[in-house]
Amino acid sequence: MSVKDSIYAAEQQVKDFTFDANVVEVFPDMIERSVPGYATIVSTLGKLAGKYAQPHTRLYDLGCSLGAVTLSMRRNLTQSGCEIVAIDNSQAMVERCRMHLQGFRSAVPVDVQLGDILDAKLENASVVAMNFTMQFIPPEQRHALLSRIFNALKPGGVLLLSEKLKGENADVDELLVDLHHDFKRANGYSELEISQKRTAIENVMRTDTLSTHIKRLQDVGFSQTQVWYQCFNFCSMVAIK
Ligand SMILES: Nc1ncnc2c1ncn2[C@@H]1O[C@H](C[S@+](CC[C@H]([NH3+])C(=O)[O-])CC(=O)[O-])[C@@H](O)[C@H]1O
Ligand SMILES: O=C(O)C(=O)Cc1ccccc1
């Protein structure tokens, strides 16, 4: 049973958004009502991991939150000798993620680490998933992180990158934002909740355009990038080494 997100329901002095214990409590409901296609994206990332995982390699879930992508990848893994490494720098998330994973049995080992993905050692990877995490990394650090991910991947390995996008120009950005806000309204968020949440994430979630993402992926060396999902400003890409 998930708890309903009412964090921004009352008028308040809005602070910068953080992944604290209050957010953890409502996170499944928050993400489901805020990200169009979240369930489809998570289940498809599992399928993609199942296709691209290589025997005796690691699969990373960077910014794992409660481990939804880890679970989905684990369900689809048939290759032998794989390990999943899930990393998040929110203590509240990591604690809840560990509890959550214990609820499901599997032969695939999962190592849930509390830490900053900017410091994490990444190696011997066939699949790296970043499901709506790059957007929280300071923009000036994104290139270096992507480059480290590329270097950690085996040839034929993949990065599964989902991001909220900034529109390529002000007009289309406004259109995508309006459509997303309609989606949130339809999922029961009030005008006040929508506007206070927008303020809360303004400084901590800096989105890039799709062309910026694709160029950065190319610059660090990925040979091919394919957008496999987009609804409004929410996008998921697969980049192949
Ligand atoms: N530097 C960092 N190091 C480690 N973790 C970080 C860092 N910055 C942010 N995070 C973590 O990245 C996660 C982003 S949520 C991912 C959803 C999940 N992937 C899902 O498929 O359910 C996306 C969202 O809420 O929009 C949070 O748990 C942060 O603590
Ligand atoms: O809620 C929003 O408006 C979003 O853009 C997505 C989101 C979802 C969960 C945490 C932070 C941002």
Image: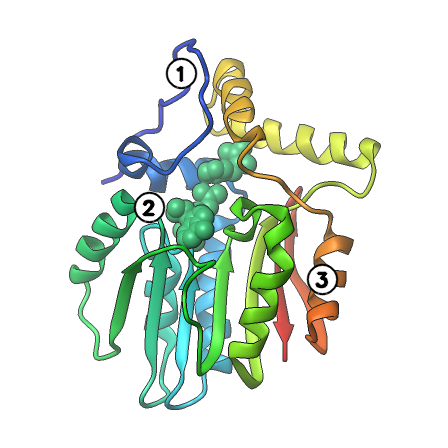
Q: Residue 90, which numbered label?
A: 2
Q: Secondary structure at mark 1?
A: loop
Residue 207 drawn above or below residue 230: above
Q: Which residue matches tag 3?
A: 216
Residue 156 drawn above or below residue 176: below
Callout 2: CB less than 8 Å from ligand 1: yes
Q: Residue 9, which numbered label?
A: 1
Q: Position of residue 59 (x, y in %)?
A: 41, 74
What's the residue type where badge 1 is placed? Ala
What's the residue type where badge 3 is placed? Arg
Marks 1 and 3, how far apart at CA: 37 Å
Report whether 128 appears left or right of 140: left
Task: Categorize mark 3 by other alpha carbons within 10 Å: few (<14), some (14-19), many (20+).
Answer: some
Q: Position of residue 92 (x, y in %)?
A: 26, 43
Marks 2 and 1, how far apart at CA: 23 Å
What's the residue type where badge 2 is placed? Ser
